[in-house]
Amino acid sequence: MILPGARLLRLGRLSTLWRPRAVVVCVVLASACLMLGLLLLGTGTMALSPIQVVEGLAGLSAEPKVARVLHGIRLPRVLTGALVGASLGMAGAVFQSLSRNALGSPDVIGFTTGAATGALLQIILFNAGAFQVASAAVGAGLATALVVLALSRGGRGGTGGGYRLILIGIGIGAVMTGVNNLLMVMGNLDRAMSAQIWLAGSLNARGWAHVWPVAAGLALFVPPLVLNARRLAIMELGDEMAVQLGVNIARNRAMLVIAAVGLTAVATASAGPIAFIALAGPQIARRLTRVAEVPLISGALTGACLLMAADLLSQRAPFGLMLPIGTMTGLCGGFYLLWVLMRER
């Protein structure tokens, strides 16, 4: 039986279900990302029209300065924002599905804070570069995830999901916040100021050294998530149902959490802690696609659109305000969360 709204696609002996509405939504979101990218590439002290941006990227511009600005400054910033938003959107979809809770995003349950701890260690104690900061963030984020998973299992035979995972994650996140504050006090003034700017979440001064870590993270962690999307959808039905359908809960949950935490960690390392995207991206994607499956691809595209739109809004804010992207997404996320809570009974 084919589910309502789904279509069956056959390729020889292989067959798969696809949903036209979800495909259309993903195409529209991808187009929106391209449009936002053109607007962002033309935004700045040197204002450029979309035609000038295309000519500069293609090397057809008569002014060499335009090509240097686009390739050396603006393009890395835009790509970092798009890749970070996609990473957070997909990671949020995984965590909300595993916890079966709309609040189960990595910035709520402490994984983002844990990744920030590793990055702060490198910034404050060793004054490290982008690669070392990214590596430390990934390692600390994965270590935090393992601790949360181990504590949330609740004894032998536990699976570590649902509300227990969220509550344990919130507790670990509070501990990591205290550690981060302690690190800020330990560092000298210059490094503490640099770390504080990083903690605000920003896309300023982002170069190609920030693009490659998050791009590598997507290439490494997205395939296992996509290949196990069906098991993730089954686990969303509940542990008992998943066990009856032959899914190894503990092993698959650990693998999915590690992959999602890896995406969160590389995103945090490249742009700092950014709220709201992992929380709202998957929820908006579900409302747009109206499908029961976990919104991995649509959630990633929605996250990229949200972060790029927030970056555009922060650069074009009135009164010449240049708000950090983390501050802008935090403000938008607070209003969004209030709206969700008020409309739900």
Image (cartoon, helix red, strand yellow):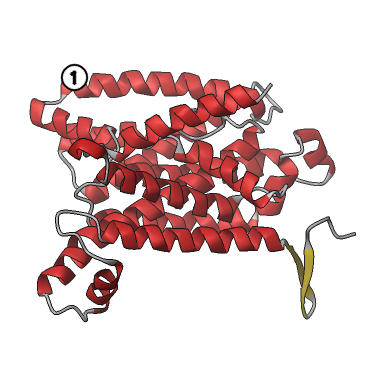
- The answer to whether residue 28 is left or right of residue 334 is right
Which of the 4 image quadrants contains residue 64? bottom left
Q: Is residue 110 above or below residue 7?
A: above
Query: Residue visible at 50% across and 46% down?
Result: 89
Of 131 and 321, which appears nearest the observer? 321
* Residue at image location 45% in from the left, 27% down from the top: 334
Q: Position of residue 344 (x, y in %)?
A: 66, 25
Report x, y in % for residue 26: 57, 60
The residue wearing badge 1 is: 185
Tell me: 320 left or right of 133: left
**Picture quarter containing residue 67?**
bottom left
| Residue 152 or residue 51, whichever sits in front | 51
Does residue 144 appear in the picture of this structure? yes
The residue at the far right in this view is 1
Q: Residue 109 at x, y = what percent?
A: 50, 28
Rendered view: 212 above or below 285: below
Residue plotted at (51% across, 36% down): 279
Point out the image quarter for the C terminus.
top right
Q: Quadrant of the N terminus?
A: bottom right
Q: Residue furthest front?
A: 318
Give how far across and how far down residue 150 sits, in percent.
Answer: 56, 28
Which kind of residue does numbered mark 1 sit on?
Val
Q: Is residue 152 visible?
A: no
